[in-house]
Amino acid sequence: MATRVVSEVQKINSAIADVYAFLSDFSKIGKLIETARQMGAGNQMPELADKIEDVRTTEDACTFMVKGVGEMGMKIVEREEPKLIKLEGDGRLPFEFQVWIQLLDNGPYDTRLRITAEAELNMMMKMLLKGKLEKGINQLAEGLAKIPYGYIR
């Protein structure tokens, strides 16, 4: 049975088109991680960037090393502009997972973001990972809400 985790809804002070254009292209996300790492403590995302190493991206896929976890990979399997990006794991983890990034246009420069993750976990994995998944999905949503989308090209 699948384990589903849903983030809190986050407000992003950017136009939905800018948010979607950025999040639907993994090559832009790879550049952001490198920029955050270079900016260090002055950036809003240094803690996340410090946990991620060896980032390799294309428009549709990315792989990276997460300290303490190992190599992970994701691929974009569905895009519904400007409101949905569906991701799946690329088989590097011992379980299958899907992630939906949902966007809602709530007005000019007011985009709402929610992340839903679903993973096929056995009972033992579910007991060990559900709390970490909930925390991680909320941290990811909060981090994505802090990106200055209108300024990144």
Image (cartoon, grey):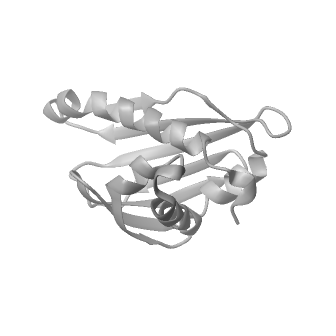
Q: How many marks?
A: 0
Q: Quadrant of residue 71?
A: bottom left
Residue 1 visible in this rendered orientation of the protein: no
Q: Quadrant of residue 31?
A: bottom right
Q: Residue placed at 77% from the left, 52% from the top?
A: 17
Q: Quadrant of the C terminus?
A: bottom right
Residue 74 visible in this rendered orientation of the protein: yes
Q: Residue placed at 49% from the left, 49% from the top?
A: 45
Furthest residue toward right: 108
Q: Quadrant of the N terminus?
A: top left
Looking at the picture, how far across and down is residue 137, in whole percent? 43, 36
Q: Nearer the viewer, residue 38 or 123?
A: 38
**Left or right position of 46 against 29:** left
Q: Nearer the viewer, residue 93 or 21?
A: 21
Looking at the picture, how far across and down is residue 87, in whole percent? 48, 53
**Figure check: 142 above or below 26:** above
Q: Nearer the viewer, residue 19 or 75?
A: 19
**Left or right position of 48 against 148:** left
Furthest residue toward left: 124
Looking at the picture, how far across and down is residue 24, in whole percent? 61, 58
**Left or right position of 9 against 137:** right
